Image (cartoon, rainbow, N blue to C red):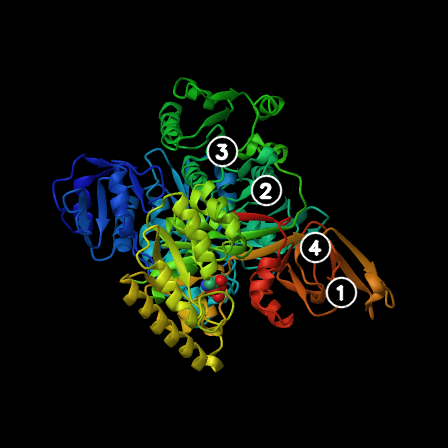
Amino acid sequence: MNLNIVNIETVLNSKWNRNPTGKSIDNISIDSRSLQNNDKTLFFALVGTNHDAHIYLKDLIGKGVRNFVVTHIPDGLESKANFLVVKNTLEALQQIAAHYRSLFSFPIIGVTGSNGKTIVKEWLNFLLSPDYNIIRSPKSYNSQVGVPLSVLAINEKHNLGIFEAGISTVSEMDKLEKIIQPTIGILTNIGSAHDEGFKNLEEKVKEKMLLFKDSEVVIFQKNSDVEKFILPKTKTISWSFTDTTAAVFVSKKEHTHEHTGIEYTYKGNISTLKIPFVDDASVENVITCLSVLLHLEYDAKTIQSRIELLYPIEMRLKVKKGINNCSLIDDSYSSDFQSLKIALDFLESQKQHQKKTVVLSDIFQSGLSNEVLYSKVAELIVSNNISRFIGIGETISTLKTKLPNAIFFKDTNEFLLHLEQLNFENETILIKGARSFQFEEIVAAFAEKTHETVLEINLNAISHNFNFFKSKIKATTKMMAMVKAFGYGSGGFEIAKLLEHHKVDYLGVAFADEGISLKTAGIKLPIMVLNPENTSFPAIIQHQLEPEIYSLKGLNAFLKIAEQKKLKDFPIHIKLDTGMHRLGFEANTIDDLIATLKGNSTVKVQSILSHLATSDDLQHKDFVQYQINLFEKLSSQLMNELEITPIRHILNTSGISNFPQAQYDMVRLGIGLYGVSNDSEEQKYLENVGTLKSIISQIRTIQTGESVGYGRRFMANRESKIATIPIGYADGIARSWGNGVGFVTIKNKKAPILGSVCMDMLMVDVTEIECKEGDSVVIFGESPTVTYMAEQLKTIPYEILTSISQRVKRVFYRE
Ligand SMILES: *Cc1c(COP(=O)(O)O)cnc(C)c1O
């Protein structure tokens, strides 16, 4: 893309604060972490209900970004960069995108619907790519932010666009329509997903159909609820299994084990098509694609030859564990330039290893000449500080002169032959290639062979939950995030890294070794250690951790070492016992505490804290108030007599929700970050973070009277289909979750657990569920939720989360 900096003024109806340096913008950014932020970037400082990108502007100026669209110029930055002040930075981004879109006149396909948008978009891209230079939304960039960013990636060489539009409530589609301006509209399945934002189905359909306001043609599954919102001027191509008046009438549908065969009539001709999927959703998505191909006048033979090759789509980037302590980012089904940028940003956000490697295939359909394309690729590789670059294919070897240290192979096989010699170890490897290169073989060669159970952690959900609690406290209140017990079981380092990005003020861990591993992995935030053992004090000092001191004994032991090491003002945290009776100075020890600290300059009381015993239970409100009053009294006494002004803090997650008046200078957020609230109202605002997943190992049918598992605790009273899942109590699933108490979710349906949970396995009833071996199983996540499990098992979500064994792989992803 290329935008004239002065034209932007006209589009946004605002003036630069000073004469901008440079003339053109070739990169639009909203992500402060992206390494592609440079002097030709225009950065939009987006403001959400719970976050505000203006806090990153100073850092970005330090990194060389010069041009910003903002709602206000932060103090002290006026003379440091070029600013365009607007009322709403998101609307400004959308206006720029709409303006940019209107500069191009090739056909644009706009896809919306409740399910299947991304799949249909990716498949159409695959099916049409032999004949067009396609620009499409990367991944599922379909939101108010994602759509403008996708559209801004169009260039002169493209001759077809495919963009996805996703909405969650009324009045959103109008904005997306202005940006996409589709000429061909596609409505995928209009199921019941995301319905909360709409009064009813009618309102939802009506809103979605706004995308097609000025489209020439709309393609959809025939349905009168949809048809009534299609304008008379718009041409339609509908398809149907039942209605013979549909343009594409599917008269037959037969499954084999691996295929679905259909027979369809279009313009009076009957044709057959073999679809390489058996599930209903995939078949419907293929028929939607078929309708588009028919509209574009492809013949039945070409259609068959292309649809035969369709493959399942991996929807998001994920990090997997690889051999020799490597981490893998598997992006093995696409290699366009736009998604390369996204994948490199994702690679940058992974901090497990210093060393970063990219394995990339030839890039197709960029719309650019090889020379221009690979120059841009080289720039990206250099600006992202990639340690080693491996190119596979014919055209990518153009990079030889531009990246002198890169290694090239002519095809995937040749690369695999050299795998040993390349000595992959302790590095993060992005594996990204076009479908035809079959990079899945590379991924398989790298992947660590472990069992199929994973705990998937949604990093976006953590950001969301963090921002939610941040918005509940005063802007001046600091935030400590508790990442003890391996981030409540969700992964200590990755979460700490994310929180560092969100500029959390403090981290809290339980033991010194947890803090040490965070510091050694590169976390710079101050870290408080809740329960430092005296033996760990030297290590605490060495790694600049900050101990919580809760007794005179501990204080004296720490002072002794601190004095030996001639420390000055070393930060410590004083814990007061106000009623929890776990750790802390009691009221009757305060005088001694004061006497010991008075005039001592080896340590500095960085903060004073206490912990509430009943913040989650409003029946005990009075006790909380008693604790707060005592905290007020004791901490004031310390502050007055020692003449200090430390940070004071007493609230945990449910304290933030129930006793906001006691937030003092800081709060300590724990379980809320991980998506759990003890208040069902508040729970609605949090996003689920962890999904524990496994697969079906085996399925069998048993007869009435036969039993399942140890002790024959389940007896079938009908013919039953039983699936075995490779997860058990050694993975952290309570044994009492079996025997009809608990269930897992397979294909969105509940499968009750039969008999007792075994050490490494459990068995479920799938009599009513259409499923096969290898299918995915959700143990907890959206359903059942951890909160539900805890209620049934008479425990608390904390225990469930932290019980998941370390042998279960953690996989982190961003939406
Ligand atoms: C664990 C812990 C927290 C966080 O509690 P949540 O209920 O998870 O928010 C806060 N303070 C202390 C001292 C803790 O041990």
Could you tell which of marks 1 and 3 lies nearer the N-terminus? 3
Callout 4: 10 Å neighbours few (<14), some, many (20+)? some
Q: Residue at x 52, y 53 (%)?
A: 533
The quadrant in which residue 668 appears is bottom left
Q: Residue at x 32, y 57 (%)?
A: 175
Measure how far apart labels 1 and 3 are at the Cα level.
51 Å
Residue identifier under label 2: 311
Question: In the figure, is residue 8 to the left or right of 526?
Answer: left
Identify the secondary structure beneath mark 2.
loop
Residue identifier under label 1: 754
Question: In the figure, is residue 487 to the left or right of 468?
Answer: right
Amino acid, disc 4: Ala
Measure how far apart labels 3 and 4 are at the Cα level.
50 Å
Could you tell which of marks 1 and 2 lies nearer the N-terminus? 2
> Which marked residue is nearer to the observer: mark 3 or mark 2?
2
Amino acid, disc 1: Leu
> Which marked residue is nearer to the observer: mark 2 or mark 4?
4
Measure how far apart labels 4 and 1 are at the Cα level.
18 Å
Identify the secondary structure beneath mark 4.
helix
